[in-house]
Image (cartoon, coloured by chain):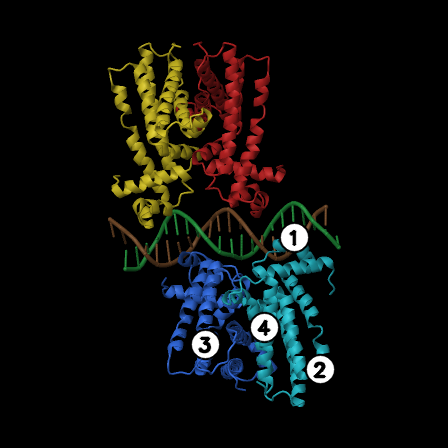
Chain colours: A blue, B cyan, C red, D yellow, E brown, F green
Amino acid sequence: MAYNDKHIQIIETAEQLFAKKGYEATTVRDIAGQADVNIAMISYYFGSKEKLLEALFNHRLGSIKMGVESLLKNDFLSPGKKVDILIDEHIERVIHHKGFYKIMLCEQVINKNPVIINLLIEIKKRNAELINKLINDGQKKGVFKKNVDVVLLMSTMLGTVIQVLINQPFYRDFNNLKKMPAKKFEETMQKKLSAHVKKIFKAILTNEG
Amino acid sequence: MAYNDKHIQIIETAEQLFAKKGYEATTVRDIAGQADVNIAMISYYFGSKEKLLEALFNHRLGSIKMGVESLLKNDFLSPGKKVDILIDEHIERVIHHKGFYKIMLCEQVINKNPVIINLLIEIKKRNAELINKLINDGQKKGVFKKNVDVVLLMSTMLGTVIQVLINQPFYRDFNNLKKMPAKKFEETMQKKLSAHVKKIFKAILTNEG
Amino acid sequence: MAYNDKHIQIIETAEQLFAKKGYEATTVRDIAGQADVNIAMISYYFGSKEKLLEALFNHRLGSIKMGVESLLKNDFLSPGKKVDILIDEHIERVIHHKGFYKIMLCEQVINKNPVIINLLIEIKKRNAELINKLINDGQKKGVFKKNVDVVLLMSTMLGTVIQVLINQPFYRDFNNLKKMPAKKFEETMQKKLSAHVKKIFKAILTNEG
Amino acid sequence: MAYNDKHIQIIETAEQLFAKKGYEATTVRDIAGQADVNIAMISYYFGSKEKLLEALFNHRLGSIKMGVESLLKNDFLSPGKKVDILIDEHIERVIHHKGFYKIMLCEQVINKNPVIINLLIEIKKRNAELINKLINDGQKKGVFKKNVDVVLLMSTMLGTVIQVLINQPFYRDFNNLKKMPAKKFEETMQKKLSAHVKKIFKAILTNEG
DNA sequence: CATGAATGAGCGTTCATTCAT
DNA sequence: CATGAATGAACGCTCATTCAT
């Protein structure tokens, strides 16, 4: 299904509101009001509020998954480098699509809509398989250790990144960085997070310190 | 505030339902029905549905935080051992209070109720300070490295554990463990997770492989 | 199920409006407004608008069917007399419950709600059986002819009476009775209708002129 | 107003749906969908949903009334024969236009649209006058009795026939005719009904048994 | 003459909460 | 301290209709 400009406008307004107030607490009137469209448009375009949520998932997951496959096929990068890129791209995506990742987190927890559940399972499976290949490649080349639990490793990456996102205000407060400009803080945060996750992956995957 | 048996009954029924369907999608009729009390009781006992959520947080956070302080004061355990215990206790808690941790995760994301936000910030601060002390202690004893980012480390622990909890069905599917009995699977999972997080902490905190 | 005063109030207001505007064109707001109750009461008391319609049928059909059985058992009346009473009682009922008979007519035509369909089928069957017995009794006593089609006979009674009800304004107009007071007209009408239907039944059932 | 093929197509689709679900419960989307025309066409062609209903009445009533006048003028048929033909033609029409007669019945009951009300009153008046003439003719010729109430007589014919139509499934059930093929049943039904109504008219109009 | 896109109004229903008892 | 009855507000959604093209 292709979405036109107005579809996108509604989807992205919904994304903002779902992320801020949660799916259930967001009313179609909220969305219509903020997107500056008629209330009836949501049902007219998407069929229902729930289908709008599904459309949001289709929209974002569709644009998110691109690019992962190409990394794997690249023959000039070492497995270790590829893992680093994988991590950085993930962090980039989460920061760029904060709102969507928050919604996705909650929807995974609440687990209600079967369409979305299946979408997420599929994505997870695909990601796990790709990372598995990448690790297998590294193992064959002798740079990665044997016996790596891919799902645990993924959980650490996903979990750490989203947790940092959620805890950002707290992080700032705890480390006395309230005065740092928002932009600067975000950049610092991103660098630190990137280094942190890479370090963990190195520890799990290689024999280096 | 002290809760009597009926309070607790309502709170814990609410916990189950909030975890399964989300706070907003759970109705006071659901809760009253399942807890086998009159609908009016929820407003009567707690003031409102939202106050019930706050009561749930008070109830669980109160019982959860106990025991962390005592660990820190213990003079017979090495900092490394203390970290291991900290990790295992956290995993234990999350597994034992799955439902509540799911609710807490979503509430952190949605960020609406100021009472709960403050409660959570306070908990995080306390936890971060305790772990900070623990790490400082290890640093003074020369067993932990300098320059450890406590919040990042905490985020990894919290994030990994909750992510594994959420991904449990997927983990089972991906690793072809569908036939393993639920109990056996949970135990295996817990051991692997524990070892995984400990390994990460060792890598971040010490110079060992 | 027992209905209290407020139930009855709502049911009878609904009856008026359904008869005047039709079921679909009547809104719960109409009913609530005219019955002077809160809108939510309709769902609260009856579950839904449709269940309210079912409640109306239960209410009226329950009160209507009484008395027919007793007529049959009466040993002092001749079959011919019983038929006359049956006719008069039916006319009386239709006039007294004009609104309900109109609703019933339309619901039979539209045929949607299975609960109501079954209710009506049951009533028809019971009525047809009772009249059948009455006719059989007359046949045994030699006062009624053989080979009477009960359903056709019933259809003539029901059809004629309801048609007259519907055509009342036209009847008045056609017979230049516009000036006659409403009450007088109704009485005249009823008498003529009664004589008319009785004459038809006599013609079908007996050998008299 | 003249209707083209598409007009007719829409009108007759609407007729089917109005008969099945009722006017209010039928949506213009239903009609447009089933008639395979654009939704906007209904308003565009007819002005509104209500005007479409009016168009349906114009369409059917126009085609139905033809032929009644000619019968009256016929000099070769006896008044009795004419009445028989009148009855048969009415039964034929109702069976052939089941759907429309159902709609007409409900619209008479609900009484909302003044255009339709007037249309129906006019038809009734014309029919009553024609039948009146026919009866007067028979009275002059001495074959019909004096003091016949035309409206009551008409009500019996119209009421009986429509009631039989409505009760057809019940009739079949009650007389254990479930196994009879639909076509055969309809024919039998029609013959019986015709004989039944003719008998009634004979009883009312003449002195014969 | 025809239509896809769009809309204001209002639909039946559900919600958390209140209140008299 | 406890509760059945009741309610105002708001929910998601559908309706017949309109209008630019």
Which residue lies under the disc numbered 3?
Answer: A136
**Snapshot quadrant of residue B51:** bottom right
Q: Nearer the viewer, residue C113 or C82?
A: C113
Which residue lies under the disc numbered 2?
Answer: B77
Q: Chain of mark 3?
A: A
Q: Secondary structure at mark 3?
A: helix
Residue A205 place in picture, x, y as percent: 51, 80
Q: Is residue A174 above or below residue B8?
A: below
Is there any visible trace of residue C18 in the rendered image?
A: yes
Q: Is residue C195 above or below residue B131?
A: above
Residue plotted at (48% across, 74% down): A94
**Snapshot quadrant of residue F21:** bottom left
- Quadrant of image for the N terminus of chain A: bottom left
Q: Amino acid at mark 2?
A: Leu
Q: Amino acid at mark 1?
A: Ile
Residue D47 place in picture, x, y as percent: 33, 45
Q: First in sequence: mark 4 or mark 2?
A: 2
- Dot 4 and dot 2 residues touching (CB under 8 Å): no
CA distance for labels 2 and 1:
51 Å
Q: Chain of mark 4?
A: B
Q: Amino acid at mark 4?
A: Lys
- Mark 1: few/some/many CA within 10 Å (<14, 14-19, 20+): some
Residue plotted at (71% across, 72% down): B66
Q: Secondary structure at mark 2?
A: loop
Between marks 3 and 2 in the image, the one whose residue lies nearer the viewer: 3
Q: First in sequence: mark 2 or mark 1?
A: 1
Which residue lies under the disc numbered 1?
Answer: B39
**Lateral position of residue E11 relative to residue D18, left or right:** right
